[in-house]
């Protein structure tokens, strides 16, 4: 289903909730690096969540809505319901994304084990219709952070990861590397099929699965937000979970019981995370260079 697009925030609110409904209060929410976020309180006390950015960044929200819809369509794991996207000429002009407001509380118990099972189930759902003209990729490009993520369809996972993940980031980061770095980088690219493996089945990936993009939903379970979806190898999602602090050990134990890893995952993990580290290098600068060079030097 296509997300409705509106020419103003007020028209979106009126269409979704009724002509007599207005925004009574807009409360900023902290936490994001790219967008502004607000809790909107509507007439009658209902809350909804809004992201906003410049009008030129509307494609960020269009892609996010598509990604959330793809995850929701699997019906195995929670995501906030997408309400609307649009642009508004107020405040000098801005783009907005309206979502269901999340006020859930951790249900305790087997929270992480249940999340692992749901994620594994998402990774096993059919990817039919998600990639036209190939097995890996996605029907449209999207964004990883604020940078474009290329999802050109490809029949092989290793080739896709080389051509659509590592090579574009390396081109943009070229100025950070010397001749010796490039010798090592080119060896990785030329011999990538000696490190990565083709998956047993293609999987819908969240694509940016770190702890900040897992929240407690309104049902008390783990929900996914801020996706950068595409079809790939499930272990690329798992590798990302380990990059910035990791999830509890119970999550990994439970996931592996349902979907055992192919042998050699620990070696492949760094290559998958090299993509995200390069993306952070290109977005935020040299603070990520040493970790990039560490992986390049040991692979």
Image (tube, rainbow, N blue to C red):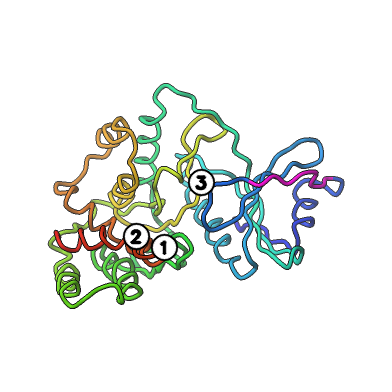
Is residue 269 rendered magenta in the image? Answer: no
- Residue behind mark 2: 287
Q: CA distance from mark 1 to mark 2?
A: 7 Å
Element type at marker 1? helix
Q: From the viewer's perspective, is 214 left or right of 21?
A: left
Residue furthest right as drawn: 20
Which quadrant of the structure image shows residue 91?
Answer: bottom right
Q: Which is more toward the observer, 107 or 39?
A: 39
Q: CA distance from mark 3 to mark 1?
A: 31 Å
- Residue behind mark 3: 72
Residue furthest top as drawn: 109
Dominant secondary structure of the magenta stretch?
Answer: strand
Are there few (<14), some (14-19), or many (20+) residues within 10 Å of tag 1? few
Mark nearer the viewer, 3 or 1: 1
Is residue 27 rendered magenta in the image? Answer: yes
Q: Are marks 1 and 2 in contact (CB under 8 Å)?
A: yes
Whether 224 is drawn above or below 185: the answer is: above
Which quadrant of the structure image shows residue 105?
Answer: top right
Q: From the viewer's perspective, is 211 left or right of 14?
A: left
Are there few (<14), some (14-19), or many (20+) residues within 10 Å of tag 2? few
> Which comes sooner in the sequence, label 3 or label 1?
3
- Residue behind mark 1: 284
Are there few (<14), some (14-19), or many (20+) residues within 10 Å of tag 3? some
Q: x, y percentage for residue 160? A: 29, 67
Element type at marker 3? helix
The magenta region covers 21-28
Whether 159 is drawn above or below 1: the answer is: below
> Which comes sooner in the sequence, label 3 or label 2?
3
Q: Are marks 3 and 2 in contact (CB under 8 Å)?
A: no
């Amino acid at each position: 289903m296509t997300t409705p697009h509106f020419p103003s925030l007020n028209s979106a609110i009126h269409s979704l909730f009724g002509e007599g409904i207005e925004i009574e209060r807009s409360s900023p929410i902290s936490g994001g690096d790219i967008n502004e976020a607000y809790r909107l309180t509507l007439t009658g006390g209902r809350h909804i969540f809004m992201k906003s950015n410049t009008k030129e960044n509307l494609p960020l929200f269009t892609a996010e809505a598509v990604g959330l819809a793809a995850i929701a369509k699997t019906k195995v794991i929670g995501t906030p319901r997408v309400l609307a996207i649009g642009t508004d000429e107020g405040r000098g002009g801005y783009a907005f994304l309206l979502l269901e407001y999340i006020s859930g509380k951790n249900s305790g118990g087997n929270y992480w084990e249940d999340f692992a099972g749901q994620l594994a189930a998402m990774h096993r759902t059919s990817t039919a219709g998600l990639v036209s003209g190939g097995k890996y990729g996605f029907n449209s490009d999207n964004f990883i952070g604020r940078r474009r993520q290329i999802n050109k369809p490809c029949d092989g996972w290793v080739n896709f990861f080389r051509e659509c993940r590592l090579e574009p980031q390396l081109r943009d980061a070229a100025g950070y590397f010397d001749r010796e770095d490039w010798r090592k980088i080119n060896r990785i690219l030329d011999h990538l099929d000696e490190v990565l493996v083709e998956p047993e089945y293609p999987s819908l990936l969240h694509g940016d699965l770190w702890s900040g993009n897992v929240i407690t939903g309104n049902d008390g379970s783990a929900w996914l937000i801020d996706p950068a979806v595409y079809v790939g190898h499930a272990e690329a999602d798992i590798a990302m979970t380990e990059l910035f602090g990791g999830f509890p050990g119970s999550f990994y134990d439970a996931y592996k019981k349902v979907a055992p890893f192919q042998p050699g995952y620990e070696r492949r993990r760094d290559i998958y995370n090299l993509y995200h580290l390069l993306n952070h290098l290109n977005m935020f600068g040299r603070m990520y260079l040493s970790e990039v060079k560490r992986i390049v030097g040991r692979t």
